[in-house]
Image (cartoon, rainbow, N blue to C red):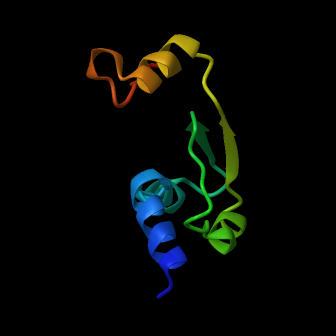
Amino acid sequence: MTSGDVIQRTFMQKAGVDRMAALLLAIDIVRRGGTISLVGVYGGMADPLPMLTIFDKQIQLRMGQANGPDAYRMFQQKADGAVKKLLNP
């Protein structure tokens, strides 16, 4: 393993999207032809999506950042100890 590999692995453990469990669960449990909505910054290149399953189940993916600039500011600054925000539709 090269030093670059070690650095990349360490970086992805700290900053990468390595917890795809919620998205993968959504893909598993959404009904055929259903829609999965991803809100906020949820991206990375570390884990591939199961594209064959998404295609086979005719899943529609909708995604984008939420219109909540104040919530993003609080999250970024860790104001009031914020590490996550709950959005009520």
Nearest the eye: 77 or 55: 77
Query: Where does the image place residue 58, in percent across and percent down from the top left?
Result: 71, 60
Q: Which of the 4 quarters of the picture holds residue 52?
A: bottom right
Seen at 58% across and 40% down, the residue is: 38
Seen at 50% across and 17% down, the residue is: 73
Nearest the eye: 78 or 33: 78
- Above or below 84: residue 79: above
| Numbered disc total | 0
Query: Where does the image place residue 69, in percent across and percent down from the top left?
Result: 58, 14
Seen at 49% across and 55% down, the residue is: 17
Query: Where does the image place residue 85, in percent across and percent down from the top left?
Result: 40, 25
Query: Where does the image place residue 16, in percent across and percent down from the top left?
Result: 49, 55
- Above or below 12: residue 67: above
Q: Which of the 4 quarters of the picture holds residue 56?
A: bottom right
**Looking at the image, which residue sits at the far top?**
70
Q: Is residue 44 left or right of residue 55?
A: left
Q: Which of the 4 quarters of the picture holds residue 19?
A: bottom left
**Looking at the image, which residue sits at the far bottom?**
1
Seen at 51% across and 21% down, the residue is: 72
**Looking at the image, which residue sits at the far front?**
3
